[in-house]
Image (cartoon, rainbow, N blue to C red):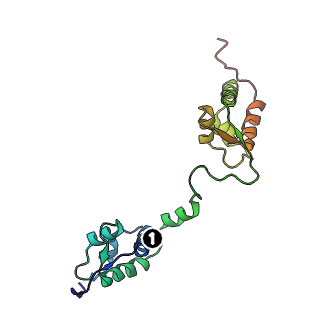
Amino acid sequence: MIPASLDEAPEPITKEMRTALRHHWKRTGFSTRRVLEAHPPIPDGLTIALVNDWIANRVHVARPSHWNHVVKLWSALPDCDAYSKRMVSRQKGAGRPRDPDTATRISFTREMSEEFKAELARTNADMQRDILNVAGAPDGVTQRLLYIWKYQHAKTTRSDHWNFVMGILRAMPDFTSKFSKL
């Protein structure tokens, strides 16, 4: 234990300070216990619960020596792999993914959903094998999108997606069962 000056007055934790501490906590992926126990000695009066309370915004003051010690330890640690991947793949904003500037959206009607289901039934097409694995499929044509069309959970869709999928289905021959002639 590092002897701490017990007469050191606690100071308020600002929003910026808490944001920085949370950033290091998320960035490294390490728990408070792992950080403090891996880097002894710990100053007198500094506990894992206290640091967790700082992160959770339950305690609003800290001794400067305690705060500086924790921030110094956490800021020296490397980023975790999950954090790096999360930062690369993070979607920009809420809602559906952004369309490219060249994409046009069209209203998705009940008739379009019925046409899609009729083509699936006529061809007995397997969504994964016959539609999604076709070379040249536009980005964004996914199994989820096809289910959204099938169960009519969309108000709009991209015209290039619709034209691509329906072009494939219309070009497929009618399905005839080998067992229907028995």
Image quadrant in which you'd find residue 43: bottom left
- Residue kind at label 1, given as amino acid type: His
Seen at 60% across and 49% down, the residue is 96
* View extreme (top): residue: 182
Image quadrant in which you'd find residue 107: top right
- From what the image shows, is residue 33 above or below residue 121? below
Front residue (pair 181, 115): 115
Front residue (pair 10, 72): 10
Front residue (pair 63, 66): 63
Seen at 49% across and 63% down, the residue is 82
Tag 1, which secondary structure? Answer: helix
Q: x%, y% of residue 173?
A: 76, 27
Front residue (pair 45, 109): 109
* Crowd band around label 1 with a 10 angstrom C-alpha radius: few (<14), some (14–19), many (20+): some
Q: Quadrant of the C terminus?
A: top right
Q: x%, y% of residue 139?
A: 69, 49
Q: x%, y% of residue 20?
A: 44, 74
Q: Quadrant of the N terminus?
A: bottom left
- From what the image shows, is residue 179 above or below residue 107? above
Q: x%, y% of residue 157?
A: 68, 41
- From what the image shows, is residue 23 above or below residue 106? below
Image quadrant in which you'd find residue 133: top right
Seen at 71% across and 54% down, the residue is 100
Query: Is 182 positioned to the left or the right of 65 in the image?
Result: right
Mark 1 = which residue? 23
Image mark count? 1
Seen at 59% across and 59% down, the residue is 92
Query: Is 55 positioned to the left or the right of 122 in the image?
Result: left
- From what the image shows, is residue 9 above or below residue 119? below
